[in-house]
Amino acid sequence: MATIGVIAGDGVGPEVVEQGLAVLADVSRLDGKRFDLVPFDLGGERYLKTGEVLPDSVLADLRKCDAIFLGAVGHPGVAPGVLEKGILLKIRFEFHQYVNLRPVKLFPGVETPIRGKGPDDIDMVVVRENNEDLYVGAGGFTRKGTAEEVAIQTSINTRSGVERCLRFAFELARSRGKIKPFRGLSAQDRERGLVGLVTMVAKTNVLTYAHDLWMRTFTEVSVDYPDIKTDYNHVDACCMRMVVSPEKYDVIATTNMFGDIITDLGAVLQGGMGLAASGNLNPLKTAPSMFEPVHGSAPDIAGKGIANPIAALLSVAMLLDHLDAPKGSAAIRFAVGKVLAAGTPRTPDLGGSAKTADVGRAVRHALEAGA
């Protein structure tokens, strides 16, 4: 039996988590697995009542889980950064979730804002380093609140941290290529036996210390993967190319800060935040990994029952992948694809008027039909 910690969290989090857990229950039998769901009361309401963000005792209980399913964190009554740093970043760092995995896939039936591009053109994965860079919190203030104030935030990058992220990206490109070789490879690439592409994204022409480390490590690691093609983009060029030629990307490996930015761009390409799933991975499984939709708590629509649950459902699929339940994850993706291709029901973010529960129910019906 696998133990899943459930943090419904704030805003629309509980609404989409409810649908995710219902789908999880439906597919659990496919892989013959049983799941013990353990709820955790974390988020803005707890903080406002008790002043606690993530007590050490709760962190210890979370550590006992095999995976964590998170709805959303963020409360209008709590100052920005308190919950994000105190819950999200603390879990990511304490549990060594050093890869943030963000699939960017356009499903048939979903519109992308890029004219002339379809599902065959938008199918990439971003591997974002998740434990270093500016998010370490190294820095501080001098003369805060005065006209002479100085604020410093330092980017921390280690050889071991960079290398483990890049190796994960190369392994992912190889595994994707075994299923279906990257379509952007040329005939000559295929003749050479190449099956995938890893594009490193950084800013080596300006950040000449930290990103020199990234480039040297990238070059050295690539030698161990002769079946994977490599490329490099400055982050600004990557943002332009993702919009103009998304089909040129297979696996992107990048820093924590740049990954945070380009993955939101990727979410727009695939139809919006309501479709964007993510995983914070501890690939060695020495501590639980955490899976969450990336749309946040969306307090402006919280309680209205109109949040799109698809990102949460796809996050459950990623969770099942991590727990070695491939039949269940595949069934969820198939059912989601069937509902999206049908064009209805759809929540307001996709131009419809359906409720969160309507979409969840449709996916569950698609699961039953495909069983």
Image (cartoon, rainbow, N blue to C red):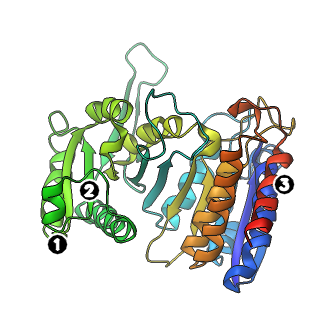
Q: Nearer the viewer, residue 247 or 262?
A: 247
Report which quarter residue 139 is drawn in.
top left
Residue located at (66% from left, 73% from top): 328
Give above or below for 257 relative to 338: above
For label 3, the crowd category at 10 Å Cα-Cα, with few meaning under 14, some 14 to 19 and many 20 or more, is: some
Total marks placed: 3
Which is more N-terminal, label 2 or label 3?
2
Which is more N-terminal, label 2 or label 1?
2
In space, the residues marked 1 and 2 are separated at their CA atoms by 14 Å
Report which quarter residue 110 is drawn in.
top right
Q: Nearer the viewer, residue 45 or 104?
A: 104
Nearest to the eye among marks 1 and 3: give it: 3
Q: Quick one: quadrant of the N terminus?
A: bottom right
Nearest to the eye among marks 1 and 2: give it: 2
Report which quarter residue 325 is drawn in.
bottom right
Q: Nearer the viewer, residue 265 or 7?
A: 265
Which three-letter amino acid code belongs to the residue tagged 3? Arg
Mark 1, residue position: 224
Residue 22 location (% of width, % of height)? 81, 64
Residue 227 location (% of width, % of height)? 20, 68
Which three-letter amino acid code belongs to the residue tagged 2? Leu
SS label for mark 1: loop
Mark 3, residue position: 361
For label 2, the crowd category at 10 Å Cα-Cα, with few meaning under 14, some 14 to 19 and many 20 or more, is: many
Mark 1 vs 2: CB contact within 8 A: no
Answer with left or right where residue 207 lies relative to residue 64. Answer: left
Residue located at (85% from left, 47% from top): 358
Mark 2, residue position: 197
In space, the residues marked 1 and 3 are separated at their CA atoms by 46 Å
SS label for mark 2: strand
Give above or below for 223 relative to 212: below
Which three-letter amino acid code belongs to the residue tagged 1? Asp
